[in-house]
Amino acid sequence: MTDATELRRRTQELLAAHPPASTGRTAFLEARFDAGLAWVHYPAGLGGLDAPRSLQAVVDAELAAAGAPDNDPRRIGIGLGMAAPTILAYGTEEQKRRFLRPLWVGQEVWCQLFSEPGAGSDLAALGTRAVRDGDTWVVNGQKVWTSSAHVARWAILIARTDPDVPKHRGITYFLCDMTDPGVEVRPLRQITGEAEFNEVFLTDVRIPDAHRLGEVGDGWKVAQTTLNNERVAIGGARIPREGGMIGTVSRTWRERPELRTHDLHQRLLDLWVDAEVARMTGERLRQQLVAGQPGPEGSGMKLAFARLNQEISGLEVELLGEEGLLYGDWTMRRPELVDFTGRDAGYRYLRSKGNSIEGGTSEVLLNIVAERVLGLPPEPRNDKDVAWKDLAR
Ligand SMILES: Cc1cc2nc3c(=O)[nH]c(=O)nc-3n(C[C@H](O)[C@H](O)[C@H](O)COP(=O)(O)OP(=O)(O)OC[C@H]3O[C@@H](n4cnc5c(N)ncnc54)[C@H](O)[C@@H]3O)c2cc1C
């Protein structure tokens, strides 16, 4: 049984064998993975020790106290939060061994090739085609809003392999090499002026069958693991009390008394309480995760995250008055990660608009909560039994 004492002992052993001060960052992270201290709830040999997920905090605290480098989780969020749990759940042994170590260490960045121009909320309507040719699949189509595609080495991809069956049934899940010559990545400029996401054109991309994840035609089921984890990854990050955006605006309130008004005070207090409730709900959700896979409850967290980010960043802009309208830099940058707290108020205000769209729109998440958490009657779905090729487009 791997308990907290055992994890502390193993962590100290790792630190003694690879002192952070004299070990390169990548070498340290690889050694940490090999010692099973990367994600302790993963299986032994794959970066974990089959330990309870809640004990990860014990390892993280010991390593932070020793000044050990981390794997910069924000830079590799799609890999850690979405690709890894899906590969773990559906991958072959060979796939798990090939992909999980460089993913966790951060040597290989991942992106998500799901959304298409005609398939976002209705993702199962996607039209990117994968046609089998011996041991490979030939993929043609267009994806859109692909965050991090410009820095990604691999992508999780869903494509249509059977147009003759209803839309949810003819999809297959693949791991796509972004360096394949048929993959073309073009920047998409956002309201912030940056291009953190992209259009991705796939032209005769050849994916070996060995890079199929799950059974042919089972892609929708496999994608549910990704999507449930995505909502937790976007809305469920652990933050300290008065951390994140509410921390930034509270600090401004304390440090700049000349900006204060009675109305804004009341709104700040309301949002402070809402942010604390969301934070504690997140803690509860994480405790549930310890016991199993994320369910639709993650949708509730992601909903609250989007609403709070938009309302808090709006309050901050109002509080700062004219200063809040300043926007530092409109040059089109290609950031590797989204940094909410290290930027100015204008950036936070503009970037948080996307929070109610990415990872499922708030309207769609409300439907999920209504149907799967509250058990309310489902939306009418007339196309459930119609072959994808016969759907109106
Ligand atoms: C910042 C950002 C990053 C993203 N990153 C990625 C990524 O890396 N990879 C990826 O694959 N995708 C990514 N996306 C895409 C995102 O998942 C889609 O934009 C989203 O699912 C919505 O799809 P859509 O844009 O096609 O809008 P649509 O589905 O066309 O929706 C349009 C409007 O109709 C509403 N609507 C649609 N269906 C219903 C319904 N049944 N009930 C009520 N209202 C409905 C929606 O809420 C929305 O307001 C990203 C998006 C953003 C904003």
Image (cartoon, helix red, strand yellow):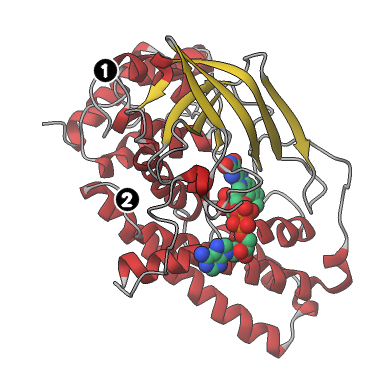
Residue type indicated by callout 2: Pro
Q: Give the percent coordinates (x, y) of residue 44.
A: 23, 22
Q: Is residue 78 above or below residue 110?
A: below
Q: Nearer the viewer, residue 363 or 260?
A: 363
User: Which structural element holds mark 1?
Assistant: loop
Q: Is residue 344 above or below residue 82?
A: below
Q: Quadrant of ligand 1?
A: bottom right
Badge number at residue 147: none
Q: Nearer the viewer, residue 26 or 164?
A: 164
Give the residue drawn at x 62%, y 86%. 266
User: Which structural element holds mark 2?
Assistant: loop
Residue 306 seen by the camera? no
Q: Quadrant of the N terminus?
A: top left
The extreme bottom residue here reads: 262
Badge number at residue 45: 1
The extreme front residue here reads: 390
Choose top left, top right, bottom left or bottom right for residue 98.
top left
Q: In terms of sequence position, does the residue under pointer 1 or pointer 2 come before the other?
A: 1
Give the residue drawn at x 88%, y 47%. 330
Q: Give the percent coordinates (x, y) of residue 186.
A: 76, 31
Choose top left, top right, bottom left or bottom right for residue 278.
bottom left
Residue type indicated by callout 1: Gly
Q: Is residue 134 above or below residue 238?
A: above
Residue carrying label 2:
294
Q: Nearer the viewer, residue 175 or 107?
A: 175
